[in-house]
């Protein structure tokens, strides 16, 4: 962001800017390998201890299929998102480096004609998968489907603007669907935190902290997108304070989201250690109606994105 805003001179190669995020993908791959080894070692030891009648660990008597299912689901989802992100960064690096090369020397490199449509190919895959999952499989709330539609529309307008030079589309209009997504996300977080305050949701301390950090990041990111929509494309007359403001807020948003996600992940890991991947059983109450006895769900667990498993209790339930 500092190089893009012309705050610091570009005195090092472009690949140095992308190197930290590429190293993060390598670290994530190492974490996956370490997790697979640790899970295999844990299950082998538990199977050996299960044969001993004097074992005192409750996890040795637990069925491990739910733990394996959840671990495999998380690994595949995280690995797929990481692979798409790494591919996006490689394509973005090739496009930016080729554009810099053309500007500096006048020669056309191998990737000089790389379009924004190709660069956004990993994001197209994720957005289409989300739309298919929400519309065909019907496993998502309609608000999440609406967010996928808004993201898809923003990418289409960006492609028309950059690749096909559509002058009717301004950057304000292109960033407007992203701002709408942030507003919907903020409303969802306010709903969850307010539900915790009135006693409907039973958030843990880590989940409540993550909710506050997410709300702060959404507010800052909304301001950042609005400012970027006003100055895009970057003009020479933009004040230095505005450019410095953007360069500082961009990593702050990522830091807040990262710390919140880390707190939720630590909470989920502790829950897996206690329960071994088993789902909590909440008995239902019986209520006598005109048609007879009816089972009433009074409490349970809801899986909320970026929050993990959230316990809830109906307000009229004692």
Image (spheres, grey):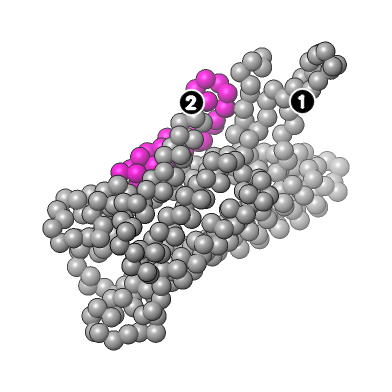
Mark identifier at residue 48: none
Question: Which sits in the foreground, 237 or 172?
Answer: 172
Q: Position of residue 241 (x, y in %)?
A: 16, 50
Question: Which sits in the foreground, 62 or 210?
Answer: 210
Q: Which residues are magenta?
A: 195-223
Q: Give yes or no for residue 281 being in the magenta stretch.
A: no
Mark identifier at residue 283: 1
Decide if residue 240 is on the left or right side of residue 261.
left
Q: Position of residue 233 (x, y in %)?
A: 25, 60
State how far apart marks 2 and 1 are (Cα): 26 Å
Regarding residue 171, the answer to whether it shows in the image is yes
According to the image, label 2 marks what residue?
194
Q: Position of residue 254 (x, y in %)?
A: 39, 50
Question: Vertical placement of 204 versus 61: above or below?
Answer: above
Few, some or many residues within 10 Å of mark 1 (<14, 14–19, 20+): few
Q: Residue at x 76, y 39 (%)?
A: 58
Magenta stretch mostly in which secondary structure? helix
Q: Residue at x 80, y 48 (%)?
A: 49
Question: Which sits in the foreground, 238 or 291?
Answer: 291
């Amino acid at each position: 962001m500092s190089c893009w805003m012309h705050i610091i001179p570009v005195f090092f190669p472009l690949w140095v800017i992308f190197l930290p995020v590429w190293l993060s993908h390598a670290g994530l791959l190492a974490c996956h390998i370490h997790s697979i080894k640790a899970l295999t070692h844990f299950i082998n030891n538990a199977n050996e201890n299960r044969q001993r009648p004097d074992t005192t660990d409750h996890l040795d008597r637990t069925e491990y299929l739910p733990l394996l299912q959840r671990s495999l689901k998380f690994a595949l989802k995280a690995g797929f998102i990481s692979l798409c992100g790494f591919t996006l960064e490689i394509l973005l690096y090739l496009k930016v480096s080729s554009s810099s090369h053309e500007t500096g020397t006048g020669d056309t490199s191998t990737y000089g004609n790389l379009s924004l449509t190709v660069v956004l190919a990993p994001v197209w895959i994720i957005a289409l998968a989300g739309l298919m999952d929400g519309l065909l499989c019907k496993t998502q709330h309609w608000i999440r489907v609406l967010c996928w539609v808004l993201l898809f529309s923003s990418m289409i307008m960006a492609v028309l603007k950059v690749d096909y030079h559509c002058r009717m589309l301004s950057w304000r209009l292109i960033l407007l669907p992203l701002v709408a997504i942030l507003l919907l996300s903020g409303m969802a977080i306010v709903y969850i935190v307010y539900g915790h305050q009135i006693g409907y949701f039973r958030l843990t301390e880590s989940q409540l902290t993550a909710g506050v950090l997410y709300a702060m990041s959404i507010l800052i990111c909304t301001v950042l997108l609005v400012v970027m929509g006003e100055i895009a494309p970057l003009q020479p007359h933009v004040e230095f304070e505005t450019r410095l403001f953007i360069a500082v807020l961009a990593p702050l948003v990522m830091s807040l989201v990262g710390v919140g996600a880390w707190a939720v992940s630590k909470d989920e890991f502790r829950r897996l250690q206690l329960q071994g991947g088993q789902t909590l059983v909440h008995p239902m109450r019986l209520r006598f109606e005109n048609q007879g006895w009816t089972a009433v769900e009074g409490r349970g667990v809801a899986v909320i994105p970026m929050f993990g498993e959230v316990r809830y209790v109906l307000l009229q339930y004692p």
